[in-house]
């Protein structure tokens, strides 16, 4: 499989707004997280939604985030809590060694 | 449930506006069908007339969903509680572990089992719609599909769980899983204390649907159940 | 800016109503129809989601879960020229007359 990221890699979700059907929730866009799991490759729902075949398959990742990073100043529960979302590779960007954008 | 309101019921359909509910309970039901419900019945009739679907096609799907209940998941959880090797298979290859227990999860693309531990409690939501492991658990409850759950579960999971009577210790970390893609998530709740003497069937009876979504733990055994075993 | 359906973290005062209702026959039918149509390639998980998401936001908020499914099913079937709105109107009127309701 041609997955770009592996488990443990830091990633950032692209901060884009796109028209059409997408499955990357707004609340994670632009946020920094890590690859928790590499799920494999799946057909692209953004294309399937319009009756197309969704090919080529896209790598899908379980991406983890600290809740305090997702909801700064709003998250009122434990600072150790995390949230996980399944995100397709084309929505993810690599992150540099110091946590800066490459 | 038949899933159909056929024309030829043999009822006297007097369309002149008198209250049909007095002698025809089904009509009372029909009076409550909202606009979009009537549209779906109309669509069904048209598709059958045009040979695009058959009544059996629709009934097959009704029957398929009726057979899917949380009892399926409960059996898998109970087996995992008593058989550590099964638990490992459930965690590492859930679809195969399902099949072992005779649960047909073939229509799922894949699913992931999330183990609750002394230190970690998992909670599942679908903020974008209502994704749910239907082939294993059946249809989701109304609250799972509600705007309130979809909005709040990701930002205040403990507050949401509290509304189900669940209070977690401070040192337990909460992990929320938002099912945004093809993976479906099932929580493996912790085995309750004081269940050492229970048979697998009795254990399965403690595994509620809500515990496999993650809003509650599994049920505690009642004193009666423990004493009877 | 999140679209209406993209609800994660949306501020809300709405209490969580944990009461459940047994599905009405029309809801069971809507549920089954969507899956049956999916098997014929006339619907699909992603297509249905797209059709639901495209609905005006006040309708999305006002309709119940299976009302949204029914509306989205009509959208997909009419987009694909399998049925027309007018045909559905006529059939609905016919059913209402048969049942003695309006």
Image (cartoon, grey):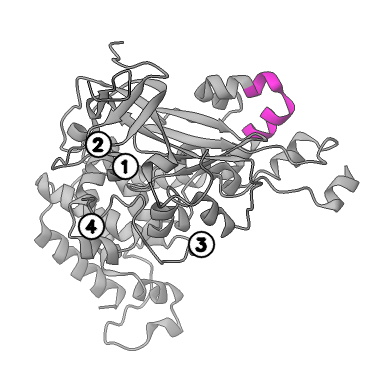
3D distance between C-alphas at marks 1 and 2 = 7 Å
Q: Which mark is residue C40?
A: 2
Residue on which the image places disc 4: C71
In front: mark 1 or mark 3? 3
A15 sits to left or right of B54: left
Check the picture and name the quadrant holding the C terminus of chain A.
top left
The furthest residue to the bottom: B18
Of the numbered discs 4 and 2, the one sitting upstream in the chain is 2
Of the numbered discs 4 and 3, the one sitting upstream in the chain is 3
Q: Find out whether residue B107 is within the magenta segment.
A: no
Same chain letter for marks 4 and 2: yes
The reply to whether callout 1 and callout 2 are in contact (CB within 8 Å) is yes
- Which chain does the residue under circle 2 lie in? C
Up-down relation of residue B106 to residue C20 (above or below): above
3D distance between C-alphas at marks 1 and 3 = 25 Å
Span highlighted in magenta in the image: B76-87
The furthest residue to the top: A1
Residue on which the image places disc 3: C20
C33 sits to left or right of C17: left
Residue A48: % across, % down = 21, 33
State the count of labels: 4
Residue B73: % across, % down = 58, 37
Q: Find out whether residue B86 is within the magenta segment.
A: yes
- Which chain does the residue under circle 3 lie in? C
Query: For the stretch drawn in magenta, what is the main secondary structure?
Result: helix
In terms of secondary structure, where does tag 3 sit? loop
**Residue B68 seen in this snapshot:** no
Classify residue B198 by image quadrant.
Answer: top right
Residue drawn where x is 32% and y is 31% of the image? A87
């Amino acid at each position: 499989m041609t997955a770009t990221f592996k488990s443990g890699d830091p990633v950032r979700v692209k901060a884009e707004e796109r028209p059409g059907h997408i499955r990357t929730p707004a609340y994670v866009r632009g946020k920094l997280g890590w690859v928790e799991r590499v799920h494999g490759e799946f057909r692209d729902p953004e294309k399937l939604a319009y009756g197309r075949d969704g090919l080529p398959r896209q790598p899908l990742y379980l991406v983890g985030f600290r809740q305090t990073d997702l909801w700064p100043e709003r998250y009122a529960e434990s600072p150790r809590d995390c949230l996980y979302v399944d995100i397709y590779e084309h929505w993810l960007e690599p992150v540099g060694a110091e946590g800066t954008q490459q | 449930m038949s899933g159909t309101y056929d024309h030829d019921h043999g009822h006297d359909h007097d369309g002149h506006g008198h209250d049909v509910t007095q002698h025809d309970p089904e009509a009372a039901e029909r009076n409550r069908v909202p606009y979009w419900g009537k549209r779906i019945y109309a669509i069904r009739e048209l598709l059958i007339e045009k040979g695009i679907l058959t009544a059996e096609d629709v009934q097959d799907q009704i029957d398929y969903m009726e057979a899917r209940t949380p009892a399926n998941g409960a059996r898998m959880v109970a087996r995992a509680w008593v058989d550590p090797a099964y638990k490992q298979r459930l965690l590492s290859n859930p679809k195969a572990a399902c099949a072992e227990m005779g649960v047909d999860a073939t229509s799922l693309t894949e699913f992931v089992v999330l183990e609750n531990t002394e230190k970690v409690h998992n909670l599942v939501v679908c903020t974008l719609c209502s994704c749910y492991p239907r082939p294993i658990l059946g249809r989701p409850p109304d609250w799972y599909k509600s705007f309130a759950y979809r909005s709040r579960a990701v930002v205040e999971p403990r507050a949401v769980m509290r509304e189900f009577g669940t209070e977690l210790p401070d040192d337990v970390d909460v992990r929320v899983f938002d099912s945004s893609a093809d993976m479906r998530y099932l929580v493996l709740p912790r085995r309750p204390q004081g269940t050492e003497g229970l048979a697998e069937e009795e254990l399965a009876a403690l595994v509620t649907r809500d515990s496999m979504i993650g809003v509650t733990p599994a049920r505690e055994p009642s004193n009666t159940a423990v004493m009877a075993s | 800016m999140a679209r209406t359906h993209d609800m994660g973290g949306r501020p809300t005062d709405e209490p969580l109503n944990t009461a459940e209702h047994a599905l009405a026959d029309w809801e069971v039918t809507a549920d089954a129809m969507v899956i049956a149509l999916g098997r014929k390639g006339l619907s699909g998980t992603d297509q249905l989601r797209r059709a639901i998401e495209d609905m005006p936001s006040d309708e999305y908020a006002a309709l119940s879960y299976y009302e949204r499914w029914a509306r989205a099913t009509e959208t997909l079937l009419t987009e694909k020229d399998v049925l027309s709105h007018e045909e559905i109107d006529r059939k609905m009127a016919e059913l209402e007359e048969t049942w003695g309701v309006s």
